Image (cartoon, helix red, strand yellow):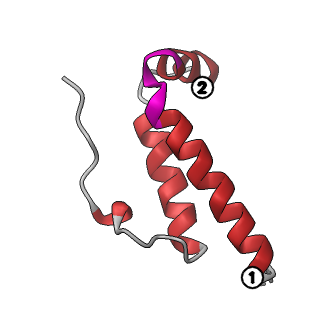
Amino acid sequence: MSGINLALADADELTELLQFIDAWLTTDQEHLNPSLQRFAGHPAYDTDRLKATLARFVFLLGGDTDGDLFEPPATTA
């Protein structure tokens, strides 16, 4: 398997973008969750799952500074 090199400045910028999207998903879940579920075509793929995926990418880029990746996912009642 070949690797991909990413300049540190580009990794930082990508990390910031992923964190921005994560914050947006957090602040407007009421509207974004139904939209994402319609787009994805399955109710199991929601904003919480997307946020977990974003957190994983941020971690892989070296941007997980507060340990969110290792916290259990939030549950909705």
Q: Residues within 10 Å of mark 2 (few under 14, many from 20)?
A: few
- On whether residue 3 falls in the magenta region, the answer is no
Q: Hey, what amino acid is under mark 1?
A: Leu
Residue 45 lies, in percent from the top left, at 47, 31
Q: In screen coordinates, is 77 left or right of 38?
A: left
Q: Main secondary structure of the magenta part?
A: helix
Residue placed most toward the observer, 22 or 60:
22
Q: Closest to the observer: 51 or 17? A: 17
- Quadrant in the picture for the N terminus: bottom right
The residue drawn where x is 79% and y is 72% is: 10
Q: Which residues are magenta?
A: 26-31
Image-based side of 15 in relation to 77, left or right: right
Q: Locate residue 8: give its quadrant.
A: bottom right
**Front label number (1 vs 2):** 1
Amino acid on which the number 2 mark rests in the picture: Ala
SS class of the residue under badge 1? helix
How many labels, in total? Answer: 2
What percent of the width, then of the height, locates residue 69? Answer: 38, 62
Judge by depth and name the residue closer to the eye, 53 or 12: 12
State if disc 2 and disc 1 touch (CB < 8 Å): no
Residue under the image location 48 percent in, 58 percent down: 55
- Marks 1 and 2 sit apart, C-alpha to C-alpha, by 32 Å
Residue 45 visible, this orientation: no
Q: Is residue 30 magenta?
A: yes
Q: Residue at x 47, y 45 (%)?
A: 51
66 relative to 17 in the view: left or right = left
Which residue in the protein does label 1 denote?
Answer: 8
* Residue occupied by mark 2: 40
The quadrant the C terminus occupies is top left
